[in-house]
Amino acid sequence: MAIETSVFVTDAWSPKSMRHELRDSSNFYLVVTAGGEAGDAVVAYSGLRAPVGSPDSDIQTIAVAPVARRQGVARDLMRRMLDEAYSRGARETFLEVRVDNPGAQALYESFGFEGIAVRPRYYMPDGVDALVMRARLPAPSPSAAPSAPDDPAPSVLSPAPPDPASSPADPQPPTATETGVTP
Ligand SMILES: CC(C)(COP(=O)(O)OP(=O)(O)OC[C@H]1O[C@@H](n2cnc3c(N)ncnc32)[C@H](O)[C@@H]1OP(=O)(O)O)[C@@H](O)C(=O)NCCC(=O)NCCS
């Protein structure tokens, strides 16, 4: 929750909302920790909603702590979520992003997302519009599987992340070890 509240501030989910998300079997959450073990400090997470058999899916959230940004962490999380969506039967994915968040939009565009609509004043209390984006999902490519050794993208996935407020971020770059997948 420390990343959620510090990164999203007025848009942050409550602990209750986050728990609800994590418990829903239609959702798929990934958690990245600094040292590659489930008990290490959380540096990033992402969530996908993809009910099995549904042709549609939604990127629910993605956040990377400032200390771990621009190392390909979000790109790796996106790739894994889109592969999971495809494997559950989805052929399209949707998301909403603040119109004043060009960095996230650039990330999504690099995965083929295109803006299809604007939802006025979607993010309250700021009153900021949401851009709705959609991507058609191609079959996962072989290169989408485990990261290459020279790829800095970390991928520690744990079903029950510890509260990072009680575990300060480790300055080491996150490692690329997959330990588990929710739900
Ligand atoms: C947006 C966010 C998830 C990106 O995480 P990240 O791990 O730093 O992203 P990556 O390193 O994987 O970047 C992948 C690509 O996304 C784009 N990108 C990411 N951050 C960017 C930024 N600040 N400005 C411009 N482009 C950016 C770039 O194309 C980048 O590729 P490049 O580094 O080769 O240029 C992260 O900045 C974040 O958590 N922001 C706050 C929360 C947020 O806005 N979440 C999205 C809500 S819809």
Image (cartoon, rainbow, N blue to C red):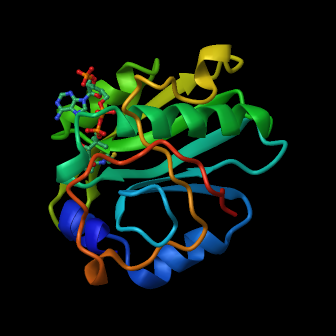
Q: Is residue 47 above or below residue 101?
A: below
Residue 141 makes an appearance in the image = no
Image location (x, y in percent) of residue 151: 41, 25
Viewer-nearest residue: 32 or 16: 32
Image location (x, y in percent) of residue 154: 43, 42
Image location (x, y in percent) of residue 132: 40, 37
Task: State the image quarter where residue 122 is shown.
Answer: bottom left
The C terminus: image quadrant = bottom right
**Image side of residue 71 versus residue 81, left or right:** left
**Image side of residue 109 versus residue 137, left or right:** left
Image location (x, y in percent) of residue 83: 65, 32
Residue at position x 25%, y 51% in the image: 172
Quadrant containing ligand 1 = top left
Q: Is residue 150 above or below residue 55?
A: above
The N terminus: image quadrant = bottom left
Viewer-nearest residue: 39 or 118: 39
Residue at position x 66%, y 61% in the image: 182
Residue at position x 60%, y 33% in the image: 82
Number of residue marks? 0
Viewer-nearest residue: 143 or 17: 143
**Image side of residue 125 versus residue 163, left or right:** left
Q: Is residue 11 above or below residue 102?
A: below
Residue at position x 32%, y 43% in the image: 97
Single out the residue that lies furthest toward the right.
53
Residue 138 makes an appearance in the image = yes
**Image side of residue 1 versus residue 31, left or right:** left
